[in-house]
Image: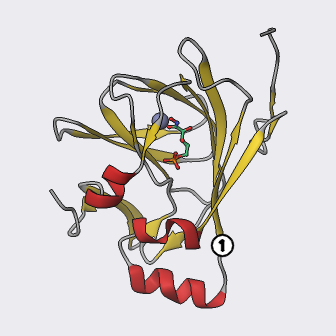
Amino acid sequence: MKPFNVEVNFQTGDLTPGKKIDRYLSGVKNMFFDQAAADAILQREDPLIYQVIYADVPEAKGHLGNCTTIIYPGKVGREFYFTKGHFHEERGTAEIYFCLQGKGKLLLESTDGEWAILDMYPGTASYIPPYWSHRTINVGQEKLIFYCVFPADAGHDYGTIEEIGYPKLVVEENGQIMVVDNPKRRK
Ligand code: PAN
Ligand code: ZN
């Protein structure tokens, strides 16, 4: 394999050349707390919640997967748009998120059940240690754009988060960004 560049556009989040995945509400609906609010939106439209654009790297040991993520601004009920969130299949692998644009929160939970939340704004490089699941939330009015680097063979386990959820929700209350308990948390 030969060295190569990709070009990252800090304003749009485009990564070229890259492979784009679109996540629409219909595909991530079950992750949101307020299912009635999600259904009401889906009656009218199926909004794009986020996109991931991957550099073409083999999913093999020794390589570094990298991509941009663009989360659109918006809410389902009181809950801000977010990424599905996952553990790495290979639990002992870390990741770095470098924020390029917008205002976000990074919600994490470890396999020990400890949780944490970090602010994301242009210039933050968030370190996600091994054994911590991670979800990103756009709490701003603009797109939230960040660049991710991870061991290319880490893998994604979405099922655990789909099943138990996160202990916290990030919602808007009286115009304020609030981190509140998730009443639907299962564990
Ligand atoms: C990121 C995420 C990306 C989208 O590249 O995959 O932000 O989030 P979900 O994968 O939870 O939909 C990453 O953490 N890779 O490991
Ligand atoms: Zn990850």
> What x and y, as percent, mark residue 4?
82, 15
What residue is shown at x 23% (from left), y 55% (from top)?
A: 167
Which of these two is toward me, 145 or 46? 46
Can you tell which quarter of the image residue 92 is in?
A: top left
Can you tell which quarter of the image residue 1 is in?
A: top right
11 on left or right of 79: right
What residue is shown at x 43% (from left), y 49% (from top)?
A: 85
Above or below 91: residue 118: below
Above or below 50: residue 56: above
Which of these two is toward me, 127 or 55? 55
Above or below 61: residue 7: below
Which of these two is toward me, 51 or 159? 159
In the image, what residue type sits under mark 1?
Answer: Pro
125 on left or right of 33: right
Q: Tag 1: Cα neighbours inside 10 Å, few (<14), some, or many (≥20)?
A: some
Task: Check disc 1 and report the residue beneath it.
Answer: 47
